[in-house]
Every structure is written in C-alpha cells, then in structure tokens.
Amino acid sequence: MTTAGNTPQWARVRNVEIFAAGTWHGQTFGLAELDQIVENFERLSMRNPPIVRPPVVIGHDEDQSWLRQSGWPAAGWVQDVWRDGRRLLAHFSEVPPLVAQLINQRAYRQVSVELYRDFVHEGQHYGWTLRRVALLGGELPAVRGLADLPLAEFSEPETPSVTITRPALSQAILDTAARRQRVLACCERLLEQGKLLPAMLQDGWLVEFACSLDNERVYRFGDTEANQLEAFLHWLESLPPLVRFAERLMPTSTVADPQLQRVLDYFEQHAPELTRLGLNRERFVQAFQRSGLSAEEFLGQRR
C-alpha cells in the first residue's frame, strides 16, 4: 500500500439524464412515478447506512464479469437523483479511472435504469425504486430521447489517504475495450438486419478476429481510405441479407409459441458464449421477434 498524493483516484459524472416520463415496455411512467423514484432514493439510499445503494454497472448482465475481472465492485455509484421536468437526473460518484476514460472516449454514450416495481423492506412497500443504472455501448436503451452521457470529471483526494496501488491502465487496454464495443454494436445491428445469424457469432471467432485488426494505419481500398477494422466492418455491412425479412406477428401469449421456445432453448444452451458477445436473453429474443424469420432461419439451422 502507498500514500496517495496528487494522483486522481476517482471520477464523477454530473447531471446524467437517466430516465424520463413515458410508456416503456408497456408501463406508463408519469410525474407521480418519477417523484416516487426520487422520494424512495432519498428515503432508502441517502440514509446512513443506506438500505439500497444503486450502483452504476456495465450493461444489464447480472454477473458483471468485466468489472470483476478489472477488480472493481461497480462502475460507480448513484450519488443523487432529482426530477427536472419530465426527466430524472443523477450524479455518479466513485467512477473508476478506466470506466471514466471509456466514457470520455465515447465507448459508453447512454444509460438505462433498472427499477424495483415495489421494493419491500421490513414489511413496508415503497413502490418504484431505483435498483441500478447501466452504461450502454452498442445496446439501445428502452427510454429514447435521453441526452448522451456527460464527460467524466477526474478529481483528486482533498487529503492524503492510504490506498491500494493498482497497475497503471495502459492506452492499449482502453483502445481494446472501445474497439470491442464498436464491433459488438456492429454485430448486433447486422444480426437484426439478417446479415449475420446467431450461429455465426456463437464461437466468438468473428468478434475476436475483428478486434484483432489494426485500427490505426490507413490503407487505400479503391477510392476509399480506411484502416483494417473499418474496412472489415464496412464489408460486413455491405453484405446482402441472408434471408428476406417479413412481418412476424407474435401471439399475445408467447409461452405457447414453439418457434419462440426453440429460440429460448438455443439461448439457454449457448448462454455463456452469447453473453460474452453482449447478447442477453431479452435482446436475443427481441432480435428474433423483429427479424420476421423462422427459428430455423434465425438460428442458421435450416438445411
């Protein structure tokens, strides 16, 4: 351990738009619901000790393997929440340097909240309560129209403190994380367009290959100049759809739909590989429902 002097330890992100009034996932949130979220944050999170301390996380995955591998318990903590008109805003505190630099490099631009519908503590029902806030890279938030994440502000400790020294984060690590976010966002978009199928992403080879390409040196491809990564992603996007899309009308009750069940079974069988690619269960099902394909076509199993 060493005494920390003037080295920045944490960062803050101020005035983040995290939520807004509207109808999201079939649930309507008015000003009363927004005020309830603010009130419950003050009642549950600003007391000492807090009953609920909402963290900032990376994506909506529960295991948060990227954070665990980096040695951080969270990507930050929600420090304050308030309503401004029809939007909820918050400050993020204790943001690790790596996460802050990725925010400032615009690898993460948007956020998405997770809420308890009716948080219960010691028999008391509180209603809508903030659970955590996810930073999104290639994922699309359910709540549209929120402003991009503000840039993170690095701060220095006011007084010397004893901290555990961590290795300096190299620019190579930051570049790799940002590059992976870009590749995953492209693959998700191509998956929804039918230009890639889930089976093509299952083993992770395509993503790893794209991440290994040079994204600095510029080459000339005909009349176009691009680095290797840009050229490869542009080539993928230029491919024709593997199948033609059609409107797919899902039944009101999806439990009895054998096509959807087949997709769900496939996800459960390959969850570790698909999760590493940034595809959680909900996003995987949404991509299938928007595609208009049969389960066999979507999974690349049609012979």
Image (spheres, grey):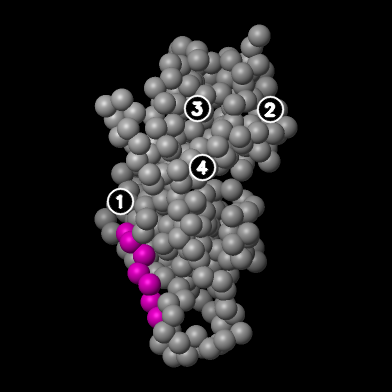
Q: Which amino acid does label 4 sit on?
A: Cys
Measured along the vertical axis of the image, is residue 299 above or below residue 174?
A: above
Residue 51 is one of the magenta-drawn residues: no
The magenta span reads 150-156
Query: Quadrant location of the C terminus?
Result: top right
Name the residue rendered at 64%, 12% in the picture.
Answer: 302
Residue 158 or 235: which is nearer the viewer? 235
Q: Which amino acid does label 1 sit on?
A: Ala
Residue 257 or 296: which is nearer the viewer? 296
Residue 44 in sight from this viewpoint: no
Residue 80 or 30: which is nearer the viewer? 80
Query: Quadrant location of the N terminus?
Result: bottom right
Q: Could you give the CA–CA distance between mark 1 and mark 2, rounded to whole angstroms?
A: 36 Å
Q: Whole-percent x and y of residue 173?
A: 51, 57
Q: Which of labels 3 and 2 is toward the front? A: 3
Q: Could you give the CA–CA distance between mark 1 and mark 3, rounded to whole angstroms?
A: 26 Å
- Disc 1 is placed on an element classified as loop
Q: Which of labels 4 and 2 is toward the front? A: 4
**Residue corresponding to mark 1:** 147
**Residue corresponding to mark 3:** 191
Q: How many labels does the image show?
A: 4
Measured along the vertical axis of the image, is residue 84 above or below residue 5?
A: above
On screen, residue 16 versus residue 170, left or right, reads left
Q: What residue type is labelled 2?
A: Tyr
Q: Could you give the CA–CA distance between mark 3 and mark 4, rounded to whole angstroms?
A: 18 Å
- Disc 3 is placed on an element classified as helix
- Disc with the residue nearer the chain's start (4 vs 2): 4
